[in-house]
Amino acid sequence: MTLPRLSALATPRLLWAAVTLACFGSVALALLAQHRFGMEPCPWCVLQRVLFLAIGGVGLIGLLLPRQRLAQGLLGLLGLGFALAGSAAALYQNQVAAKTDSCALTLADRIISSLGLDRWQPEVFEVRASCAEAAVSLLGVPFEIWSLLLYLVLGTVSVWLALGRARPPAH
């Protein structure tokens, strides 16, 4: 008996499901860390939540749409754009924001305020800490670096899908 190659298992449907699960799961873990363990979010943390939810939404659409190559390609590019934005936010948080006392009125803070998500769903999107206060590590790695790694994986999968490298299962 031979095992199927990994590329044979990487169908668009499976990849979109993995993207969706990873994104919504990461936000669920962030909310668990916030509400159970008191890790309050800064503006850059909240912005990354928004971007993970956006990529997860793209993944959900990818799951529900017919397997048209153009639609899958456009969704892959959209997912890549959000993943690049998330990577930039995570890097900025790590390299600049986490070293400052206040991150009020930064780009992240203005985006969150302009979207109104903090007023609509404060337990998820309200900024509750400064960037310095939110600088927390998990297994010795800053939280935003874990986010960056996930964004890089999501960006890679998005490129894979945009280029049509994932194949529907053979019948």
Image (cartoon, helix red, strand yellow):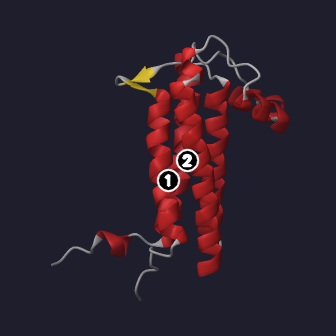
User: Which residue is at 61% across, 37% downward?
Assistant: 48
x and y, in percent, of residue 66 in the image: 63, 78
Which residue is the extreme one toward the left? 1
Taking 104 as reference, is 31 left or right?
A: left
Q: Describe the element under mark 2 as helix, strand or loop.
A: helix
Residue located 26% across and 75% down the image: 4
| Mark 2 Cα-neighbour bin, 10 Å: few <14, some 14–19, many ≥20 | many
Looking at the rendered image, the quarter that the C terminus falls into is bottom left
**Residue shown at 44%/78% (left/top)?**
167
Q: Do callouts 2 and 1 mark residues in contact (Cβ within 8 Å)?
A: yes
Q: Nearer the viewer, residue 170 or 46?
A: 46
**What mark, if any, has residue 154 been given in the picture?**
1
Res. 162 image quadrant: bottom right
- Name the foreground residue: 54 vs 163: 163
Q: Amino acid at mark 2?
A: Cys
At 50% across and 53% down in the image, what residue appears?
A: 154
Where is 117 relative to 21, above or below?
above
Q: Is residue 128 left or right of residue 25?
A: right
Can you give x and y, in whole percent of width and height, for residue 11 in the image?
A: 45, 72
Q: Secondary structure at mark 1?
A: helix
Q: Which residue ends up furthest to the top in the rendered image?
A: 101
What is the distance, in whole Å, between disc 2 and disc 1 at their CAs?
Answer: 9 Å
x then y, percent, for residue 148: 48, 39
- Count of numbered labels shown in the rendering: 2
91 left or right, relative to 114:
left
Give the residue type that dot 1 points to.
Leu
Q: Is residue 52 visible?
A: no
